[in-house]
Amino acid sequence: MEKFEWFENWFDTPYYHILYKDRNETEAEVFIDRLLAVLQLPKEASILDLACGKGRYSRHLANKGYKVTGIDLSQKSIQYARQFESKHLSFYTHDMRKLFRVNYYDYIFNFFTSFGYFKKESEDLKVLRNVKAGLKREGIFVLDFFNSSYVINHLTGKEQKTIEGIIFNLDKKVEGQRITKTIHIQDREQSFHFKETVRLFTLRDFERLFEQAGLNIIGSFGDYNLSPFDEQSSPRLIIIAQPNRV
C-alpha cells in the first residue's frame, strides 16, 4: 500500500509548478469573470475556493470585494498563499474529504479539474456531501471538470518537454475508469517519477453522485466561454448545482 496518495507528493514538489508554469492564467481569470457575470454574485457574497492551490484565483475573487476562503491539502501551497491574506481572504490547509464549515458559504467553487483524485468513488461522494453541508440553503456549487469523452478522444500519448533544463517525459493513457499521466523527470543527475490519476466521470456519473449528495444540477457549460455542453465536442464539463430543498 502506498504511504502517500499521488497528489500529496506531486503538488508539493517544485517540478509540478515548473511543468505547468505556462498555463494561460489570463484565460482562466477571464473564465472566472464570465462565470461571476452569469451567476450575478452579490457584493457581500462569501466564497469557498475548494482545492485552491497557491491561491491565485482566491486572490482574484477577493480583489473583487468578495469574502473568500481558500482550502487545499498542499501545506506548501497554503504556506505560500498566506502571505496574501487580508480581511477579505483567508487560507487553510484542509482535506476536502473532511467537513470544513456548515451552512456558511453562498458559493463554493472547485476549479480546473480538482476533483476525482481519490481511489474510491465513495470518497468523491463524501466531498460532495461536505459541499452540500457547507452551502447556505440558497447557495450555489460550481464544479469545473474535464469532459471525459473529449479527453479520451484527444489523448496525446507520449511526449517530452524540456523546461528550465529539466526533461519531462509524459505518458497519458486510460486505465480502467481513470485517466493516468505518468511523469518521468530528469534533472541533471537526478531522476524522479510521479503520476496524476483522475477518475473519468461523465455527466451521468455526476448526476447520480450529486443526487446522492443532496445537490440538484441546475445548469452546465462545455468550455471556458460558457458554451452549451456537448458530450462529443466540449473540452470541459462545468456544472452548476444547488442544495436540494427537500
Image: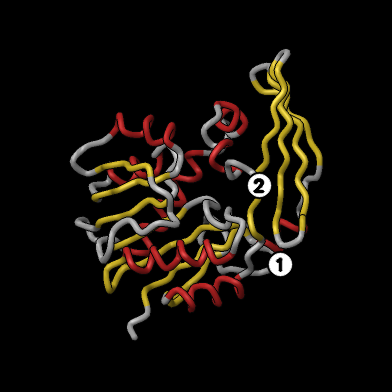
Relative to 108, 43 lies left or right: left
Question: Image quadrant of residue 167?
Answer: top right
Name the front one of labels 2 and 1. 2
Circle 1 sits on which residue? 232
Q: Secondary structure at mark 2?
A: loop
Q: Position of residue 13 (x, y in %)?
A: 55, 29
Question: Image quadrant of residue 190?
Answer: top right
Where is 55 relative to 231, above or below? above
Q: Position of residue 160 (x, y in %)?
A: 77, 31
Residue type at the position of mark 1: Gln
Residue at 64% over, 59% down = 199
Given residues 35 and 197, the one toward you in this image is 197
Q: Residues within 10 Å of mark 1 (few under 14, many from 20)?
A: few
Relative to 14, 139 lies left or right: left
Pick the quarter of the image with the C terminus: bottom left
Where is 20 relative to 40, above or below? above
